[in-house]
Image (spheres, coloured by chain):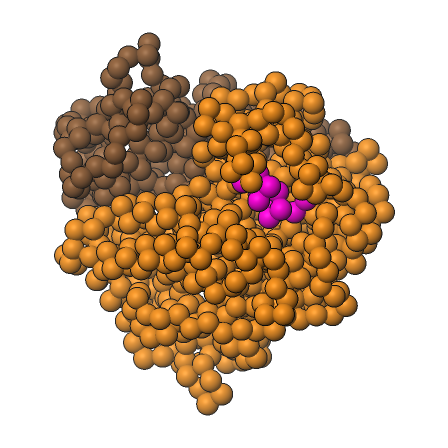
Chain colours: A orange, B brown
């Protein structure tokens, strides 16, 4: 066991984690001793896979203002958004983009040399009149550029990284005023050694859990580790039933094709070539928010209008954009279609179908990034930002580009809060035996206690989640999913890890990750079963309407007791309203 | 390679195999294995894997790890050529395992094909296909890969013409996968050479009109381990999974040094 002491420990080196690290190091007015722990190598995080852009009402190419952006975010989130948080995000978006540009981010430029902007789903002029050019972008590699730029600046400021350190637990110390976060425990992949990081403040920026689904845009490593750790500590997770399916994944593969393609004018068509979005969203058509487009695509297929030999996908038509636009503004997705489907978007429409993409829910925080332990109280010293967190700025459905915005605005806020907290507080003693949980977990998985294979359980999990808990859900399918997930948890108790070594044991790593996936899948399904309405990304065929009377509230999930099979307690938290009254959502 | 070869073709090392999809053929995947915990030197091991022509090589490695031998170790994350984790030698050429498909490797459409996989060259092997990236990242960090400016920042964004932005577009695509650097014969022989990736990232800033640190970086690259080591073999350009004109970028840095742009 090795022991380390820091002022601020950041868990995760994607956009939110590195933005937090930079804020702590350069903006807090003092320089707290900061360490970034990451399961991967820096620049491997899935922020780099984001493509289309980052919205901010710069008004560089047409009239815009942050209040319209706030409204779009709230309406896009089907009014489950906490409106104070959305207002902060839209307002601070402008500086967030300008900060990135000053850090060196190579945005595409207008003819005047300003940051160029393009259209994106659900982002409109004057409360829904028409699509607005709000997304600042760098070709279709905006996430890549953000990740690289943030890492470059971490190098510039000498930020300390612990690469391939897999955090598996946090340290909570009981005090007179309640639990306080005092550190994190990590498993070093290179050596199998356990490390304890005592810290005044810990920031979680661990990303999403898309790997509960089979068809997903998410990386193999997105297994909800941070959310799982928090949940196992008895702390709540919020709004986990809201999972976003991105409309345009490469059919059968799930690889993301940016909404920016439609922002540049690409059109979705069914088998007969019809531009079907005209029927579902007459005003902004293909640029409706993702939940609406994904459902429309699924309906086209369900009703027999799908394309291809099995009529199981629709077509993204970019052919009228011309080679020039595709090569300069959408080069990566053009290459993906060519490489993985052998389809050339310049001359043929691309087969697409919704792909599991983004968790709207996560670790509940307030607008300062402080983690909540119930509806009203925070855990001092614990912060979260990015996809693993739920502020909630995305409500029931996130608008495109708002995730890159979220990581920058709330990553920065969480980093600043953590640094300021660290400046004003002393180190608190760690709880007794801080490594016990991790040591026992690792020892159990490495012991001989069964013959179940990780891959078999994970494959079965992903199959039932795709079949029963994706774009459309019913009581029946969700009960099936719940039954399946619980049975898989039983099998997980008999899992066998073949690699017993200490050195880069990725076999063990996958077993640990699967435990988190099972935990989070069950929460998602329980939340979806209990929410008997349709709102944003959560579409119940048996309850097709939004029910503001009974369900205008956040879900809060708590783990009851220890062990993978413990009960989940569901509680509720009110939505914060400022000036926007819920309206029917039409586009 | 003199390493011994063990054949574990479809021996069912981990119980029942998942159903084989229609149209699959059996591919022999021959992998260079090395686990310093148990091996004194690298060895070759072969696995029989059912694969579709559209499978990525990464899928084959996953099949082996998940169903045949859980100890097989490699890095991977995004699985579509963006994160840069899974650079390795595939049939002797540096590739991302997630970006090369079985059909691209099948010679003459034969029924049975062998694919050879080995770690990228020139970096210490930690285990199997997983190498120590630190020497590579050190070279990257050494060229000051960040925007350097002096004086007050503007209130709004810095203005940059579309043409000035285009000037360094190619080198912004780098994902730090190390395919280029570990395909370079100079780097294999003299690990102290910065290598193509570091120079690419220096280029990205030297030719950025907003940057004021070109001179500092050029001084670093004028060093004995700098750009002059490049022998223009073009391996790096061929290896780059992002299609960056790596050799051209290195030549442009050389010219900038000669003419101190």
Q: Residue A69 lies in magenta, yes or no?
A: no
Quadrant into which the C terminus of chain B falls: top right
> Outermost residue, bottom direction?
A176
Q: Which image quarter: residue B63?
A: top left
Q: In front here: A30 or A318?
A: A318
Instruction: Judge whether residue A67 can be spotted in this image.
Output: yes
Q: In front here: A425 or A119?
A: A119
Image side of residue A458 versus residue A216, left or right: left
- Indicate whether B141 appears above or below A371: above
Please give the range of residues in magenta: A286-298
Name which residue lies at 76% across and 32% down. B162
Q: Position of residue A194 (x, y in %)?
A: 30, 63
Name which residue lies at 49% across and 46% down. A356
Quadrant into which the N terminus of chain B falls: top left
Q: In front here: A33 or A404?
A: A404
Q: Which image quarter: residue B101?
A: top left
């Amino acid at each position: 066991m090795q022991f380390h002491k820091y002022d601020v420990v950041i868990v995760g080196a994607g956009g939110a984690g590195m933005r937090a690290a930079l804020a702590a190091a350069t903006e807090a007015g003092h320089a707290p001793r900061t360490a970034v722990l990451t399961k991967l190598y820096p620049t491997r995080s899935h922020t780099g896979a984001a493509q289309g852009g980052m919205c901010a009402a710069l008004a560089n190419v047409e009239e815009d203002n942050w209040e319209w952006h706030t409204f779009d975010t709230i309406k896009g989130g089907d009014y489950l958004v906490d409106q104070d948080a959305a207002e902060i995000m839209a307002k601070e978006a402008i500086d967030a983009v300008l900060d990135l540009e000053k850090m060196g981010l190579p945005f595409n430029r207008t003819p005047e040399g300003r940051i160029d902007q393009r259209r994106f789903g659900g982002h409109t002029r004057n409360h829904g009149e028409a699509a607005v050019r709000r997304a600042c972008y760098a070709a279709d590699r905006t996430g890549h550029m953000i990740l690289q730029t943030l890492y470059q600046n971490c190098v510039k400021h000498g930020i300390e990284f612990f690469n391939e350190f897999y955090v598996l637990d946090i340290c909570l110390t009981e005090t007179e005023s309640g639990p306080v976060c005092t550190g994190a425990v990590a498993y070093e992949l290179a050596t199998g050694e356990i490390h304890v990081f005592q810290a005044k403040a810990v920031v979680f920026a661990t990303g999403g859990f898309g790997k509960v689904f089979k068809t997903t845009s998410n990386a193999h490593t997105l297994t909800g580790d941070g959310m799982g750790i928090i949940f196992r500590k008895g702390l709540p997770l919020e709004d986990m039933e809201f999972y976003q399916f991105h409309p345009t994944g490469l059919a059968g593969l799930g690889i993301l094709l940016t909404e920016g393609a439609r922002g540049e004018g690409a059109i979705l068509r069914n088998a007969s070539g019809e531009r079907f979005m005209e029927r579902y969203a007459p005003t902004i058509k293909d640029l409706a928010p993702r939940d609406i487009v994904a459902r429309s695509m699924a309906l086209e297929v369900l009703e027999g209008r799908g394309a291809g030999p099995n009529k199981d996908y629709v077509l993204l038509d970019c052919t009228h954009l011309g080679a020039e636009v595709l090569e300069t503004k959408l080069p990566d997705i053009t290459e993906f279609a060519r490489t993985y489907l052998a389809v050339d978007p310049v001359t043929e429409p691309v087969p697409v179908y919704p792909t599991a993409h983004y968790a709207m829910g996560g670790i509940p925080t307030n607008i300062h990034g402080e983690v909540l332990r119930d509806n009203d109280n925070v855990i001092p010293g614990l912060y979260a930002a990015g996809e693993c967190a739920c502020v909630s700025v995305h409500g029931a459905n996130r608008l495109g580009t708002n995730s890159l915005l979220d990581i920058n605005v709330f990553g920065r806020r969480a980093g600043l809060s953590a640094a300021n907290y660290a400046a004003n507080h002393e180190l608190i003693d760690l709880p007794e035996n801080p490594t016990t949980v991790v040591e026992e977990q690792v020892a159990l998985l490495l012991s001989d206690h069964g013959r179940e294979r990780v891959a078999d359980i994970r494959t079965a999990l992903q199959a039932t989640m795709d079949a029963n808990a994706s774009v459309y859900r019913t009581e029946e399918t969700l009960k099936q999913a719940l039954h399946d997930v619980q049975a898989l948890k039983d099998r997980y108790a008999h899992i066998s890890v073949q690699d017993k070594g200490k050195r880069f044991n990725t076999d063990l790593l996958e077993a640990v990750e699967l435990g988190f996936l099972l935990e989070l899948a069950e929460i998602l399904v329980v939340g979806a079963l209990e929410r008997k309405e349709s709102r944003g990304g959560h579409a119940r065929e048996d309850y097709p309407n939004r029910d503001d009377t009974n369900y205008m509230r956040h879900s809060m999930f708590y783990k009851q007791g220890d062990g993978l099979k413990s009960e989940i307690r569901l509680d509720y938290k009110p939505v914060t309203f400022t000036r926007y009254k819920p309206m029917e959502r039409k586009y | 390679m003199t390493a011994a070869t063990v054949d574990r073709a479809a021996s069912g090392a981990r119980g029942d195999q998942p159903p084989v999809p229609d149209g699959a053929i059996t591919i022999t995947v021959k992998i260079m294995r090395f686990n310093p915990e148990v091996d004194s030197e690298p060895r070759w091991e072969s696995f029989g894997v059912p694969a579709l022509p559209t499978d990525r090589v990464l899928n084959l490695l996953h099949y082996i790890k998940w169903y045949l031998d859980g100890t097989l170790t490699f890095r991977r994350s995004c699985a579509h050529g963006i994160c840069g984790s899974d650079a390795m030698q595939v049939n002797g050429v540096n590739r991302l395992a997630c970006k090369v498909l079985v059909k691209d490797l099948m010679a003459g459409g034969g029924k049975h094909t062998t694919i050879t996989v080995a770690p990228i060259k020139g970096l210490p092997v930690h285990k199997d296909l997983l190498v120590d990236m630190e020497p590579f990242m050190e070279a990257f960090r050494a060229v000051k890969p960040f925007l350097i400016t002096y004086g007050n920042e503007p209130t709004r964004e810095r203005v940059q013409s579309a043409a000035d932005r285009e000037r360094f577009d190619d080198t912004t695509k780098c994902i730090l996968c190390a395919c280029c650097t570990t395909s370079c014969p100079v780097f294999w022989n003299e690990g102290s050479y910065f290598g193509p990736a570091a120079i690419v990232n220096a280029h990205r800033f030297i030719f950025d009109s907003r940057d004021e640190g070109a001179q500092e970086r050029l001084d670093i690259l004028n060093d004995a381990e700098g750009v002059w080591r490049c022998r223009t073999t073009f391996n790096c350009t061929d290896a780059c999974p992002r299609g960056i004109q790596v050799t051209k970028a290195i030549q442009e840095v050389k010219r900038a040094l000669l003419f101190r742009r």
